[in-house]
Amino acid sequence: MIYNFDEPLDRRGFGSVKWDALAVGVLPMFVADMDFKSAPPIIEAIQEKIDHGVFGYGRDLDFPGVIKKWFQDEYNAAIQENWIVVLPAIVPVLAAVSHLREGPVLINTPNYHVLLAAPLKAGKETILAPLKNTNEYYEFDFADLRSRVRDDVQLFYLCNPHNPVGRVYKQEELAELSAFAREKHLMVISDEAHCGLVYDRPHIPWFTVDAWAAEHSITIMGPGKTYNIAGLPFGFAVIPNQKLREEFVTTCYALPYPGILNVAAAKAAYGQCREWRLQLVEYLRGNRDYLEKRLGEIAPAANYTHVEGTYLQWIDFRPLGINDPYRWLQEYPKILPNDGKPFGMEGYVRINFGTTRARLAEALDRIEENLKKI
Ligand SMILES: Cc1ncc(COP(=O)(O)O)c(C=O)c1O
């Protein structure tokens, strides 16, 4: 079946964070959800539960088996079903896990603003370590990490694929990070929410990097980004180490069960939506290439990443003489991006290109028109 990601959808009036709080005429390109309909198996799975009409706490005993097969098919990774801990979402877990170990959390900047803030919201300290930025190619800076890490640090928060800089880390980078974590006795919490949306190389789940990484980590994934079901929150952690898994379950005791609809959607996503995802990735790759090409034409002086994964473009328009790009984009082209500041990098904006090509073209036309007036 061929899926049509060009289908124009009017999302206003359907209770969407992205579309419903905006002035008419403003294009929302901020929060990370996409303007695409969900895959048909997801809609059918939810429909079945709706027809049944009872919405209790959700659990599907077949879900771990579906995930085990998915890891085998997608990553050639053999996992055990009991490594999986089902979660009601990813975000609440990011704060809770900071209590797994004493001391501050080491984390790179820029970073997904919620991941960055989660330990602070949970009353923990963070140690911020900037990624090395070489012409908008962001990498771990091990010399810098070594200079910042303290003896009381026991946790490192990783985001891969990296929101907002769009990196999909290579095996050698992850292996070096694992060696660093081992040397400094750090447990790695790896947020891999965007793992299904990669363009230039396969995603590598953290627990598959090496044996040490597997034993000293929590890998967190969920269907919200890849299958565009952020409004049906759900997630799961992969924790091969049994003792750590038990500690994790105790630490996350206050989290609720996921809802019945959410479990059904997640199971359908991982079990039946591979073809939909592959077509989506091709569509998003086209959007990425189009966006990059247009930026090269209309704003060659801007600094922007080559996105390897996610549908998020990280851009600095300040070299064009725009002092506050976040405000300028709202005021002139009437586009709402995310402000880079909460991600730990002021001056940048994050633009969500998970939309139709036509809408992306309209956003770029508006930017082009207004740049000409500067
Ligand atoms: C890296 C990352 N993790 C987690 C989330 C949110 O996950 P959830 O909505 O499933 O809790 C996002 C959303 O943008 C994200 O970018």
Image (tube, rainbow, N blue to C red):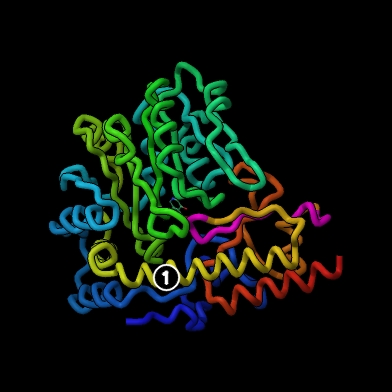
Identify the residue position indicated by label 1 in the image.
Answer: 280
Please say if 27 is above or below 322: below
Q: Residue furthest left?
A: 61
Residue at the far right: name it: 374
Q: Nearer the viewer, residue 25 or 274?
A: 274
x then y, percent, for residue 22: 62, 70
Residue 109 in percent (x, y) is at 57, 39
- Residue ID at (74%, 59%): 327
Query: Residue 70, position in %: x, y?
Result: 24, 57
Q: Where are the magenta residues, as a range?
A: 308-322
Q: How many marks?
A: 1
Quadrant where the image shows the C terminus: bottom right
Dot 1: what SS? Answer: helix
Indicate whether 39 appears above or below 119: below
Is residue 59 in view?
no
Identity of the amino acid at label 1? Leu
Q: Residue at x 75, y 60 (%)?
A: 300
Magenta stretch: residue 319 in it? yes
Nearer-the-camera pick, 271 or 25: 271
Instruction: Confirm or reject: label 1 Cβ below 8 Å from ligand 1.
Output: no
Can residue 68 be seen from the camera position used here? yes
| Location of residue 44 (image quadrant) | bottom left
Instruction: Give the percent coordinates (x, y) of residue 309.
Output: 48, 56
Q: Is residue 204 magenta?
A: no
Q: Report crowding for label 1: few under 14, some 14 to 19, many 20 or more residues within 10 A (C-alpha).
A: many
Q: Which residue, as the protein is rendered here, is positioned at the far top?
A: 151
- Seen in the image, is 286 located left or right of residue 96? right
* On screen, residue 158 above or below 306: above
Q: Which quadrant, please, contains the N terminus?
A: bottom left
At 22% across and 33% down in the image, what residue appears?
241
Residue at (32% x, 38% y) in the render: 218
